[in-house]
Image (cartoon, rainbow, N blue to C red):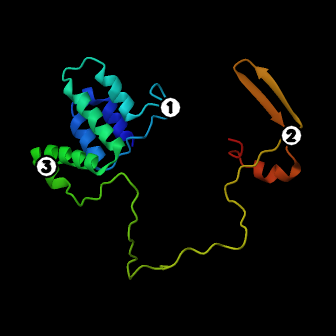
């Protein structure tokens, strides 16, 4: 999802906006995705390209073609998908390296797929069923515990603040280790 946003934002820098946009949309990048934070928060790929079309460009066709492909992807109809496919296939056919890397049946979609997993025959402890939930409640191993301190003292010594805390006698064994409070 963010790859499409990066493509639209940096199309001038990498000079391959149309190619990357066609490839990402062909592989089902989400054109509805919006930037979550920062200066571009709330903007989608279409918003970025609408702005780019209103700015001066060395090649005026690049942002317009990218905007058109994003609009087609947003439409989502079969004709729109076919147009994006034709655009990507024409770009891919011009570059033989791209053509041999991926094909119509490649698995580089940006969507989650269910993958059929096979357990090797020689695997140990292999279970062909879902894991069993343990009935007994176990204590967490790495648990942080917080206690409101009632008995403490602090002093301000310029750049440092020293905090003096009275610990209970039960904590003496654990505090015997010099690294316990680091």
Residue at (22%, 45%) from the top-left corner?
A: 83
Mark 3, residue position: 97
Residue at (32%, 37%) from the top-left corner?
A: 71
* Residue 33, horizontal then vertical, whole percent: 43, 40
* Residue 78, horizontal then vertical, whole percent: 28, 51
Frontmost residue, 114 versus 68? 68
Frontmost residue, 33 versus 10? 33
Residue at (35%, 23%) from the top-left corner?
A: 51
State the SS at label 2.
loop
Mark 1, residue position: 37
Above or below — where is 166 with respect to 112? above
Mark toward the start of the polypeptide (1 vs 3): 1
> Residue pushed farthest bottom?
121
> Crowding at label 2, few (<14), some or many (≥20) Cα neighbours within 10 Å?
few
Mark 2, residue position: 166
Q: Nearer the viewer, mark 2 or mark 1?
A: 1
Q: Are marks 3 and 2 in contact (CB under 8 Å)?
A: no
């Amino acid at each position: 999802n963010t790859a499409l946003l990066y493509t639209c934002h940096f199309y001038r820098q990498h000079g391959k906006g149309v190619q990357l946009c066609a490839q990402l949309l062909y592989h089902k990048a989400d054109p509805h995705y919006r930037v979550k934070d920062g200066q571009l928060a709330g903007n989608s790929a279409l918003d970025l390209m609408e702005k780019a079309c209103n700015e001066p460009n060395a090649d005026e066709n690049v942002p317009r073609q990218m905007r058109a492909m994003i609009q087609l992807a947003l439409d989502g109809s079969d004709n729109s998908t076919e147009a994006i496919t034709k655009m990507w296939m024409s770009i891919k056919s011009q570059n033989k390296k791209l053509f041999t890397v991926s094909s119509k049946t490649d698995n580089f979609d940006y969507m989650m797929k269910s993958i059929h997993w096979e357990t090797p025959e020689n695997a140990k402890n292999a279970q062909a069923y879902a894991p069993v939930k343990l009935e007994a409640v176990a204590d967490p191993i790495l648990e942080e515990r917080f206690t409101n301190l009632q008995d403490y003292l602090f002093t301000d010594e310029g750049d440092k603040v020293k905090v003096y805390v009275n610990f209970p006698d039960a904590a003496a064994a654990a505090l015997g280790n010099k690294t316990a409070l680091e």
